[in-house]
Image (spheres, rainbow, N blue to C red):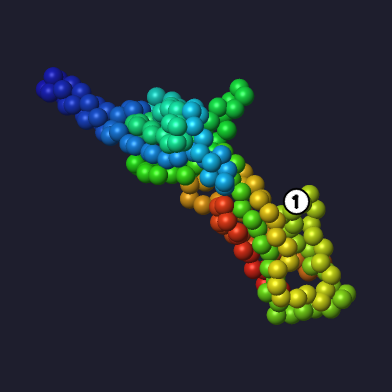
């Protein structure tokens, strides 16, 4: 009876252990893409790049780290072949000084993905337009985010008119995410509450934001 119980415990432990993947276990995934300098679509050749998985705390400590390293070819193309290391989302990075610069973040784990476009410098033009249903008067002032100069809000005197307020050319997108690059605009009239208007960049194109003036 004693040996039977001991054997059962060993089998139970082995079964539980087999249900837990160790870092690097499982299938091999592939991510392919092309590296560009900026929106001129000039490819970057012979550039070291790596695929990094954000750390998670799991069995045995921290899981994650560098999944794969490679160098772009003469056309800027790269291929990562890797196994998941039980971490969180992945990022494509390049060496920078004593560390790294993330070029694309929030890539989902446990997936093969083809033909990702990655940019060292990514921009978008931002066109801010007013959709006016209440013109207000010359005594009123609109305060609104100015993507041409983020250090201070733009002040616009009433009455307000429909149409383009301004366009910011080649606004830099700093946090480049696989699922879309989000940002927000804030505006208010006079001493009213700030209204936050989220939007998603059109990479390498014009992002049009219509601001309702009610």
For the residue pair 9 and 171, the one nearer the viewer reads as 171
Left or right: 91 as drawn, with respect to 85: right
Instruction: Tell me the quadrant of the picture where the N terminus can be found.
Output: top left
Tell me the residue at 70%/68% (across/down).
164
Tell me the residue at 77%/79% (across/down).
135
Left or right: 173 as drawn, with respect to 144: left
**Residue 45 point in image, percent of width and height:** 49, 32
Left or right: 81 as drawn, with respect to 54: left
Query: For mark 1, what is the residue?
Result: 150
Left or right: 205 as drawn, with respect to 144: left
- Residue at the far top in the pictured view: 3
**Residue 190 point in image, percent of width and height:** 82, 68
Q: Tell me the element at label 1.
A: loop
- Residue at the far right in the pictured view: 139
Considering only vertical position in the picture, is 202 above or below 76? below
**Residue 62 point in image, percent of width and height:** 45, 27
- Residue 142 visible in the displayed image: yes
Instruction: Tell me the quadrant of the picture where the C terminus can be found.
Output: bottom right
Considering only vertical position in the picture, is 64 above or below 32? above
| Residue neighbourhood size for the residue with mark 1, other residues' Cα within 10 Å, grouped as few (<14), some (14–19), many (≥20) | few
Q: Quadrant of residue 31?
A: top left
Q: How many numbered callouts?
A: 1
- Residue 9 visible in the displayed image: no
**Residue 79 point in image, percent of width and height:** 38, 34
Tell me the residue at 12%/23% (across/down).
4
For the residue pair 36 and 106, the one nearer the viewer reads as 36
For the residue pair 63 and 168, the one nearer the viewer reads as 168
Tell me the residue at 70%/72% (across/down).
163
Q: Quadrant of residue 112?
A: top left
């Amino acid at each position: 009876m004693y040996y039977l119980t001991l054997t059962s415990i060993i089998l139970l432990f082995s079964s539980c252990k087999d249900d837990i993947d160790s870092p690097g276990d499982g299938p091999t995934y592939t991510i392919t893409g092309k590296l560009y300098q900026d929106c001129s679509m000039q490819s970057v050749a012979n550039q070291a790049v790596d695929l990094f998985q954000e750390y998670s705390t799991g069995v045995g400590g921290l899981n994650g780290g560098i999944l794969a390293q490679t160098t772009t070819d003469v056309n800027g193309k790269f291929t990562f072949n890797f196994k998941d290391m039980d971490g969180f989302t992945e990022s494509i990075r390049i060496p920078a000084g004593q560390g790294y610069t993330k070029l694309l973040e929030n890539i989902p784990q446990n997936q093969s993905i083809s033909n990702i476009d990655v940019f060292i410098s990514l921009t978008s033009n931002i066109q801010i337009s007013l959709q006016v249903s209440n013109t207000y008067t010359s005594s009123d002032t609109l305060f609104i985010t100015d993507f041409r100069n983020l250090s201070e809000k733009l002040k616009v005197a009433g009455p307000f008119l429909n149409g383009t307020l301004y366009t910011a050319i080649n606004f830099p997108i700093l946090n480049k995410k696989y699922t879309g690059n989000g940002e927000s605009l804030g505006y208010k009239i006079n001493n009213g509450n700030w209204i936050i208007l989220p939007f998603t960049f059109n990479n390498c194109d014009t992002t049009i934001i219509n601001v309702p003036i009610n």
